[in-house]
Image (cartoon, grey):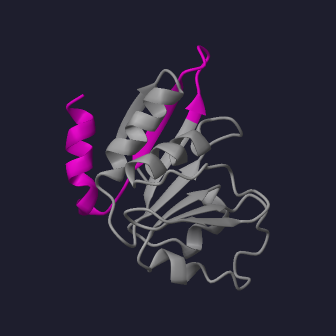
Amino acid sequence: MKTNHIVHTHDEEETRQLARKIASHLKPGDVLALEGDLGAGKTTFTKGIAEGLGISDSIDSPTFTIIKEYEGDLPLFHMDMYRIDFPEEELGLEEYFYGDGVCLVEWASHIKPWLPETTLWLVFSVQPDQSRQIGISYTDPRWNLLGKELASE
């Protein structure tokens, strides 16, 4: 999958700001795959998505619960697949991926074969100056409007 855009954020607020911008494009059934090392900004990004969806709950990583659900303008399903060894085990993921909410999947590569083809991929990396580089990839033309917004900045 080719990276369509690379965005740099310099602090947590800029990461949340990017996420709020992306949240304004989200629709029921959207799946965002978040990849990156521990501390790269995945949960901070998720906090921004939650803000953009009108969710005021405290957001933290669902590492041990696997899936956390939040109610907002759209339901948000925050998933952490880091500890999943056998994604084929019955987790009911299809119900979430093709449901009425938005899914954010941390460590999504662990379940890549089960993700919809329309998944928006975000790869986070920490730069030497502690800023974040976020590679954004998609194949679904529905994301082209977001891509145009990102390209114009």
| 151 drawn magenta | yes
The quarter of the rendered structure image containing the N terminus is: bottom left
Where is residue 47 drawn, in percent x and y? 53, 45
- Disc count in the image? 0
Q: Is residue 13 above or below residue 44?
A: above
| 46 drawn magenta | no
Which image quarter: residue 43?
A: top right
Q: Is residue 66 above or below residue 149?
A: below
| Residue 3 visible from this viewpoint | no
Q: Is residue 104 above or below residue 94?
A: above
At horizontal 74% and vertical 83% (from top left) the residue drawn is: 89
**Which residue is farthest front?**
56
The answer to whether 52 appears left or right of 95 in the picture is left
- Of residues 91 and 75, which is closer to you in this image? 75
Where is residue 30 drawn, in percent x and y? 40, 66
| Residue 53 visible from this viewpoint | yes
The quarter of the rendered structure image containing the C terminus is: top left
- Of residues 130 and 63, which is closer to you in this image? 63
Which image quarter: residue 79?
A: bottom right
At horizontal 36% and vertical 71% (from top left) the residue drawn is: 28
At horizontal 74% and vertical 58% (from top left) the residue drawn is: 82
The answer to whether 116 appears left or right of 82 in the picture is left
- Of residues 112 and 142, which is closer to you in this image? 142
Q: Is residue 85 above or below residue 150?
A: below
Where is residue 125 drawn, in percent x and y? 58, 33
Q: Which residues are magenta?
A: 125-153
The answer to whether 8 appears left or right of 132 in the picture is left
- Of residues 47 and 114, which is closer to you in this image? 47
Where is residue 134 drawn, in percent x and y? 47, 36
The answer to whether 61 appears left or right of 73 in the picture is right
At horizontal 20% and vertical 42% (from top left) the residue drawn is: 148
